[in-house]
Image (spheres, grey):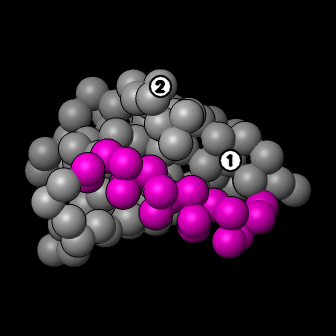
């Protein structure tokens, strides 16, 4: 079965300590969804923080400029490398679609 990729905004923290609205929604959605077993959540999280769910894929970038562009380019590389996603959900950043 093909998987679902959920892309959270670069500044969104997918953890208990600093969760934003998107992270809370995605966490709650996955808790009740029958698709959570084949869904991965992509986001940027400091390595010392634990994500809400085990299906989180951390995307770290090392730059001070064009953070959003570099972030989505790294996600794109990971998604294309895996070649297993049939659906990609982009939350609160429609400009990511054009990247």
Question: Circles 2 and 1: CB distance less than 8 Å?
Answer: no
Residue 57, position as x, y percentages in the image: 46, 65
Asked whether 97 or 79 is in front, the reply is 97
50 with respect to 37 (left or right): left
Asked whether 59 or 39 is in front, the reply is 59
Is 86 drawn above or below residue 70 in the view shown? above
Asked whether 73 or 31 is in front, the reply is 73
CA–CA distance in space, label 2 to label 1: 17 Å
Label 2, secondary structure: give it: helix
10 Å crowding of disc 2: few (<14), some (14-19), many (20+): few
Residue bearing the label numbered 1 = 4
Question: How many labels were placed on the picture?
Answer: 2
Residue 32, position as x, y percentages in the image: 56, 34
Kindly give the residue lying farthest to the front in the view shown: 65
Residue bearing the label numbered 2 = 94
Seen at 44% across and 51% down, the residue is 72
Seen at 36% across and 57% down, the residue is 70
Location of the N terminus by quadrant is bottom right
Whichever of callouts 2 and 1 sits on the residue coming sooner in the sequence is: 1
10 Å crowding of disc 1: few (<14), some (14-19), many (20+): some
Instruction: Give the magenta-colored segment's residue range.
Output: 66-84
Q: Is residue 80 magenta?
A: yes
Residue 15, position as x, y percentages in the image: 24, 52
Seen at 12% across and 50% down, the residue is 17
Residue 83, position as x, y percentages in the image: 77, 64
Q: Can residue 30 be seen?
A: no
């Amino acid at each position: 079965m093909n998987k679902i990729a959920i892309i959270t905004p670069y500044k969104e923290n997918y953890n208990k300590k600093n969760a934003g609205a998107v992270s809370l929604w995605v966490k709650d959605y996955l808790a009740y969804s029958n698709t959570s077993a084949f869904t991965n959540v992509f986001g940027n999280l400091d390595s010392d923080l634990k994500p809400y769910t085990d299906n989180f894929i951390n995307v770290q970038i090392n730059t001070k400029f064009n953070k959003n562009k570099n972030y989505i380019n790294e996600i794109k590389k990971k998604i294309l490398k895996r070649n297993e996603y049939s659906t990609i959900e982009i939350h609160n950043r429609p400009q990511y679609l054009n990247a």
